[in-house]
Image (tube, rainbow, N blue to C red):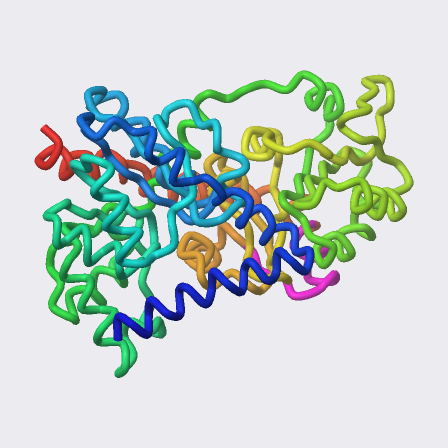
Amino acid sequence: MRLFYTFTVLCYGVLIQFAAFLGNQKAKLWVEGRKGQWYKLKSANPEDKWIWMHVSSLGEFEQGLPIIEALKRDYPQYKLLLTFFSPSGYEVKKDFPLADIVAYMPLDTLKNARHLTKRFNFKAVIFVKYEFWFNYIKVLKDKHIPLFYVSTVLRPNQYFFRPWGRWFRNHFRKVKFFFTQNNETAKLLSKIGIENFTVAGDTRFDRVYEIARQAQRFPDIEQFIGNRKCIIAGSSWPSDEKILYNFIENMPSDYCFIMVPHDISNSHVKQIESHLKDYQLYTDFDPNNQCKTLVINKIGILSKIYRYARFAYIGAGFYDGIHNIQEAIVFDVPVVFGPKYHEFEEAVDLVKLKGAFVINNQQELENVFYRLINDDNYYEKASKICHDYVARKIGATDKTMRVLEGFLS
């Protein structure tokens, strides 16, 4: 089985290179970024003690970040290797200052895993969420290097729990400890005889809570809003935007709208502009232009500006799964999103609690928006539900660090 698995991994690498050859930009970044990666990894001093954290992309990095900050604060004697699988994470964080080395994870082969663990004196390895790389797991266990999984989420329909998934789930026994996000994951582990876990929660709540505590101000956005109430559409895709335009055009005069598209390329921003009549771009902000809509054509500020929203629309619910709602609800902001949300525990929870609202079309969106605008009791109740939910969820980092302390002290 291991030979077949490794062959599949190698085939994946070849397919990515072929996609890069055909011009796929993400594949090109994946291939180019891995050129010379061993030279970077060989720059490590093998006499140093290292902690290795691996994440898939930017979202998992945000989950790992509170752990990184705690490790650098409490264990400055250890150096940190941070690896990514996806270029969408690596390209943004390749200069991350808290890591001593930032690199791509070499493909999951026994040769690469042995080479990496020979080069680094790892005292602990942390994989975030569901980065299950089975050759690395085997080699780490063989070399008695403790492997921890943080913010792990498992579901009954995953291949681990299929009749043919025994080989994969047997690798769970090689993991030192699991920090799960929820009770469902804990029950699935227990069902297959894994008991070395604790339900710690999602560390990303700690991250967004810290952002909320810092409460960075944006004077330009405050001038744009003025005395009005604000609605924010975060990480919107074209399928989201097309059902927002009619509301934006007809929304009450005491409201304004901030649109933060997922794609801020010139071509997509121009497409948005073609549907708006009364707007301006953030990069061309004019404080004297009291327009209806501000289009944020700049990356990196969305999580900080949710503080200005009365409520928010979260994008990608008509695409492949909603974007992060934690960044909004940490400011007590009720959220609205499309139907593809079921893989996100906090979204499922809040829909049941009525702090979040699902819509399937333009009419449903406008019904929910106007209810939140016109019914103060409805809005206040939803806002309090979000507040109370976040209050119950913070603290995963502390729970995780208490267990890690026994292996790092």
Q: Residue at x 34, y 54 (%)?
A: 131
Question: In the picture shown, does residue 7 fall above or below 377?
Answer: below
Task: Please state, as top left, top right, bottom left or bottom right, where the N terminus lies in the image.
Answer: bottom left
Q: Where does the image place residue 307, in percent across and percent down from the top left? A: 56, 30
Q: Residue furthest bottom?
A: 163
Front-most of 253 and 249?
249
Q: Is residue 42 magenta?
A: no
Identify the image quadrant of residue 228: top right
Left or right, 180 with respect to 31, comes to left
**Of residues 176 and 280, which is closer to you in this image?**
176
Q: Position of residue 198 (x, y in %)?
A: 17, 50
Q: Is residue 145 left or right of residue 388?
A: left
User: From the image, which quarter does the C terminus lie in?
Assistant: top left
Q: How many marks do you count on the picture? A: 0
Residue at 32%, 27% in the rendered image: 69
Q: Quadrant of residue 18?
A: bottom right
Residue 363 magenta: yes
Residue range of the region highlighted in magenta in the rendering: 357-369
Q: Is residue 132 above or below residue 255?
A: below
Q: Position of residue 370 (x, y in %)?
A: 70, 50
Relative depth, front residue between 242 and 248: 242
Question: Which SS type dominates the magenta stretch?
Answer: helix
Q: Nearer the viewer, residue 215 or 69?
A: 69
| Residue 174 pos. (x, y %) | 15, 58
Residue under the point 30% across and 47% down = 127
